[in-house]
Image (spheres, coloured by chain):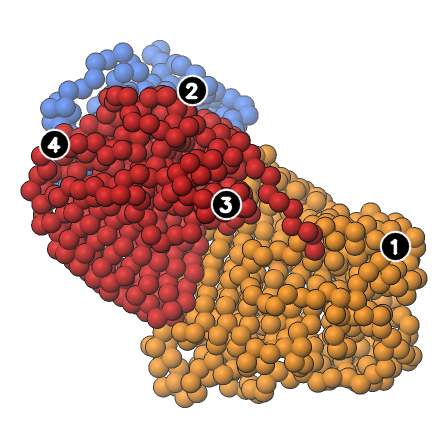
Amino acid sequence: MSVLTPVRLGPAEQTLIAQLQSAGAAAQAERLSGSGLPTRRVESYHYTDLKQLLRSVPPLAGAAPGASAPALEIAGAYRLMIANGRVQDAGTAPAGVIVGRSEGSVLTMRDDVLVRLNAALAGESLSLTLEGSVDPVIQIDRRSEGEAAHSAGSVRIFVADGASATIVETYSGSDAAHVSNHASYISLGKGARLSHIAVDLSSGQATHFATHEYQLAEDAKLHTLAIHAGASLARTQIFARFAGEGSHADFSGLNLVKDGQHLDITLDVNHAVPNTTSQERFKQIARGRSRAVFQGRLVVARHAQKTDAKMMMQGLMLSDEAEILSKPELEIYADDVVCGHGSTCGQIDETSLFYLMSRGIPRAEAETMLVRAFLEELVDPIEDAELNEALTAVIDGWLLGR
Amino acid sequence: MTTPVLEIRNLHARIEEREILKGVNLVIPAGEVHAIMGRNGSGKSTLSYVLAGKEDYEVTEGEILLNGENILEMEPDERAAAGLFLAFQYPIEIPGVATMTFLKAAINAQRKARGEAELSTPDFMRAVKEAGAQLQIDSDMLKRPLNVGFSGGEKKRAEILQMALLKPSLAVLDETDSGLDIDALQVVSKGVNALRDGQRSMLVITHYQRLLNHIVPDVVHVFSDGRIVESGDKDLALQLEAKGYAGFDGEAA
Amino acid sequence: MSALDIPTLKENIDLETVEKVRALDVDKYKYGFETTIESDRAPKGLSEDTVRFISAKKGEPEWMLEWRLDAFRRWLTLDEPTWARVHYPQIDFQDMYYYAAPKSTSGPKSLDEVDPELLATYEKLGIPLREQEILAGVEGASANVAVDAVFDSVSVVTTFREELAKVGIIFCSISEAVREYPDLVRQYLGSVVPVSDNFYATLNSAVFTDGSFVYIPKGVRCPMELSTYFRINERNTGQFERTLIIAEEGSYVSYLEGCTAPMRDENQLHAAVVELVALDDAEIKYSTVQNWYPGDKDGKGGIYNFVTKRGDCRGHNSKISWTQVETGSAITWKYPSCILRGDNSRGEFYSIAISNGHQQVDSGTKMIHLGKNTSSRIIAKGIAAGFSDNTYRGQVSAHAKAKNARNFTQCDSLLIGDTCGAHTVPYIESRNASAHFEHEATTSKISDDQMFYCMQRGLSEEEAVALIVNGFVRDVLQQLPMEFMVETQKLISISLEGSVG
């Protein structure tokens, strides 16, 4: 009934529009002027109202002035670096890893504001082709360095038919109010196997956006783990598409949220062909005045019969001022499927706590034990001992308030 | 006279609005084993939880002295460090916590609270192995998460293992015989009896007399409607078995 | 993850159900007839004049007119919501009538004066309105149900009023309540669903025509089921009913509504508002059997059912329980909700939503935990067949002050055939550490094994589906008042007709 009023644009939106214009993306600039950043009325941003949360955007990043120390050291890993969106020269690649660069962004599938911004602003992308059984863990060290800056970086990974690898992306940088928009496009060939782990360790003032797109060919097997352990505002978007029969994926994620943070993991899994399976396991822990968000959608396309997909979200509240918000969705168009989701939210189980304390373990220690136990099943599947240890250290660091 | 290990004076406790313990008096001198028998719902298990300090219960009156020290204001872990051990009727399953990790954390927390040095890993391993052998607990079971997927017998044996390792001055055994077949009952009883050393006291809470054939008490108390209504030697348990509870508390069975 | 195992349906089947399914008369939408009766209508379209016309027709006091006009002005500033998973052509709000009343009836009066044509209509629908006959035990009638019959825009009769008045219960049309009990209406109307709550509720506030009013005094347990029977008859007419139920301290009432409409090619709008208020220790049980005309097999015609229902557990230890069986309407947009304001209050939502043909359902609930120790339970069963889309949408939220809030939610969807869709969209919002929420959802189909088993025992394919579906929804069916359970089982079977083979 009402006459549509033009969207009022805030400083962050105005900066973004100017940046899009300067990057020659006039159409995207115009679109953003028309719609503004998404508010809670946009379903996919229901709990992460970017218009409210993103108050300002720093200038576009120049070349990185120098690098801070790596946020996560993984012994024996082959490390590549992207600093302020720019691909850095890498050392000699191990067998089966072909490193290249290409122009522009790589994301394909989505009509999403972060995807569009990355597409318009990412200058070049790192491309990795993985063949055979790649032995060392590949670490893609993504940095935001120097003064506060807005950067967009992009990675394209192709895991060849029958190849296998483990890739860890880490996000960190200098202690400034960066806005970083990272994109990863990952395609698994027939029978390929990949473990893809993404750990955000950005500084406490930073805004971290990451989009992971996955495409799975026949019989491909994917394992993912996304951990949020940094930033003041973070959103990781996981978009996956099962394109080949017999493919399987285990998606997992962890929001470690403390005072003042708003961390969002949004997952959209599309079972587009018959006979594919997936399991989604996400956990959130929140303390202080903070907000943890998980949105997860399983879509089973018409004719994608025999899909088996199960999603679980578990939230653990450590403070009365925290919020854990979750929206696990099912969207099912085929009948011969087994799909389900579960979601629980609560505090540490009092009975377990009493049991541990009755054996002499002090409350704080007992709580830590139970929280570790809660997270155990996420880290447990990671076979590489060094990597497993590094991730456990990240979690312990959070638990002990470091 | 030496200080008794446990002294309960006029203990009243309630959960939400309901009073469950209505004036319990009990003294257990060092080295003695006392049994408490009572029908279901008489408040026996509540007594064990109140002793261990479960939050849901509110003590409205009375005192609990452990080795002469009032423990009512203590947290459950402080009571444990002070020497109280509760073998749970239904041991809690804790997924994700390996049994070994838990045992080590518990032993060292108690040692630390008492100002003792932490147990070294080899010493700890040796202690667990020795205690485990007696209770027929193998290392596979100890690698599993705490109580998760344990059979009824395994859970009870694991409780006694913990007791053996934590060496309490007072062990409260809450319906330790429930859910055990006769073979498992013998293993568990043997484990408990091995821990009777003339100093350690025990409070054995049970519904049936049969456990008391295996763990022979020095004193038997009949519990009814939140208090002890009769005390005697081990023959009292036999009388109870013969006459039923109604003969003691006057209520129809 | 045993929590996510898909339950087998077989265990829910019992012999009694088999018998009932066998006895089914499987006819098409049997309420699709039209009653020919002269009626009095407002001029077509919507303006302040329309609002004034309705208010004048109802002989309303000035405050009520002002309330309506305020709603109308606010409505002009609102946009139609688009978040639900339903698709329909733009509604032209100027191309319909907002008031239609049978000419012979100027308001509720004694049964003798009611147009015999109307009585016949309700008899045909299986709704007995003659108290003597009911008491005399007319076949199919039940002696312990009082009925308010609403025909298009007006209440035509309310039964058992005197009987109820003896214990102080008020059961009448809302129009009458506005005139007779203005203080109660002013105190509570719009107190649960505010005037500008949402687009359709605001429209309803401006143009609502009739509905039921129930007041249960302190400490009274309502001695019979109360029920309202809604019938849309006129063409091109929207139905905007308004129901208000107040349960005073320590009282109890069970209320049921039923709805039907003639078969027509055009779509008709039904935008109701229901408000429930439960004070300390009061309990309201509200059941709906919604069987508006769903449209034909090609998706032509049918009712747009855009309804706002909300209960306010305002008092300590109060309880509101919603049970709904949604089988009709072309589009259903409906979220009966509970605001758990009082400490220790409890909300329940039990739902069966069946969609067939080209029906679109977007329905669920909201459980808003505000008070301490509040608890809620949601059991939703969605069944999609044909070319339909069936969405459960629900919100559970615990406010920072809602210490020890508890929710359990179970949503199960069943798909029959591969041309339909079943969707689940829960919003789970915890803002309190001591709140504990558990949510589970499953999607499955009727297994070939189950079908084979039933057919081997002699059931036809259609009977087997009906049987298995009735087993699937059993948890919810059991929440309905006894009088309506068997009827509802039949209805479920009928609405799934043509879904197999």
Q: Earlier in the sequence, mark 4 or mark 3?
A: 3
Chain B colour is: blue
- Asked if badges 1 and 4 are on one and the same chain, I answer no
Residue C274 — which label?
none
Residue on which disc 4 sits: A91
User: Which label is found at residue A30?
Assistant: 3
* In this rendering, the label closer to the viewer, 2 or 3: 3
Task: Please name the amino acid that badge 4 sits on.
Answer: Gly
> What secondary structure is found at the residue carrying circle 1?
helix
Q: Closest to the observer: C76 or A390?
A: C76
Displayed quadrant of residue B132: top left
Residue B111's place in the image compared with A291, above or below, is above
Identify residue type, mark 2. Met
- From what the image shows, is residue C209 above or below residue C426? below
Mark nearer the viewer, 4 or 2: 4
| Residue B74 image label | 2
Q: Colour of chain C?
A: orange
Q: Amino acid at mark 1?
A: Leu
User: Which numbered dot is residue C65?
Assistant: 1
Name the colour assigned to chain A in the rendering.
red
Q: Chain of mark 2?
A: B
